[in-house]
Structure formats: structure tokens, C-alpha cells
Image: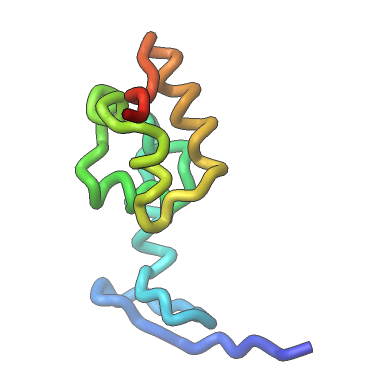
Amino acid sequence: MTKTTKNPRTCANGHEYFKSSSCPVCPICEKARKPEAGILSGLAAPARRALEGAGLTTIAKLAKRSEAEILSLHGMGPGSIPKLRAALKAQGLSFRKAE
């Protein structure tokens, strides 16, 4: 087995943390950014950032996209789709049908 080396890092806000990957995201900042309610609150950080990056921060905007479009976003995994589908259904909405 290969031992993973975690490297010390400091983010722009001064948080000190350790990471073994090249991912530049500070886990302390990311935890503070997580919304407590809404469609983004139940998602993992990469999926949340993918939707935010695409400007899909409301249920109405999400309903204008197909599942395939959402899955094509970098950071969005198939595990997030059921959560998004449930959030849409709770509002009487669904993903746009693929053409």
C-alpha cells in the first residue's frame, strides 16, 4: 500500500489545513459557505460548486435543464440527481425533457 502524504496549506483567509490532492479548495471555507436550506444544502461540495458555477441556484433555473445537462457539469455526480429530482418534485417541477 502507498502511504498518502498530506501537505500543509494556508488559504487566502488564513485557515491552515492539510490536503493530499491538488484541489485548491479550503475545507474550512467550504464548510462555512454551505447553505443551511434550499436545493444546494443537501449536496456535496463539488456538486454544489458545479451548480453555482453554472448559475443554477434556484429550483426554477434547475427545472429548465435536463438531467443530462446537469450530469455534464464538472463536479456533478449521479448521486446528486435523486436529491435534485426530489427537490424538484416537492415543488411540482421536474427536469426538462431531453430533446
Residue 63 lies in what quarter of the image?
Answer: top left
Q: Is 97 displayed left or right of 80 in the figure?
A: left
Asked if residue 68 shows in the view, the reply is yes
Instruction: Give above or below for 22 relative to 74.
Output: below
The total of numbered circles placed on residues is 0
Taking the view exactly as shown, the residue that stands out farthest to the front is 99
Asked if residue 38 shows in the view, the reply is no
Measured as percent of width and height from the top left, residue 24 is found at 36, 75
Residue 57 lies in what quarter of the image?
Answer: top left
Instruction: Give above or below for 23 relative to 72.
Output: below
Measured as percent of width and height from the top left, residue 49 is found at 33, 52
Taking the view exactly as shown, the residue that stands out farthest to the right is 1
Instruction: Give above or below for 8 relative to 51.
Output: below
Q: Residue at x 43, y 50 (%)?
A: 76
Q: Residue at x 23, y 29 (%)?
A: 61
Q: Residue at x 36, y 14 (%)?
A: 93
Instruction: Give above or below for 18 relative to 52.
Output: below
Measured as percent of width and height from the top left, residue 85 is found at 47, 25
For the C terminus, the quadrant is top left
For the N terminus, the quadrant is bottom right
Q: Residue at x 46, y 42 (%)?
A: 43
What colouring does the structure picture have? rainbow
Q: Is 50 displayed left or right of 7 in the figure?
A: left
Residue 60 lies in what quarter of the image?
Answer: top left
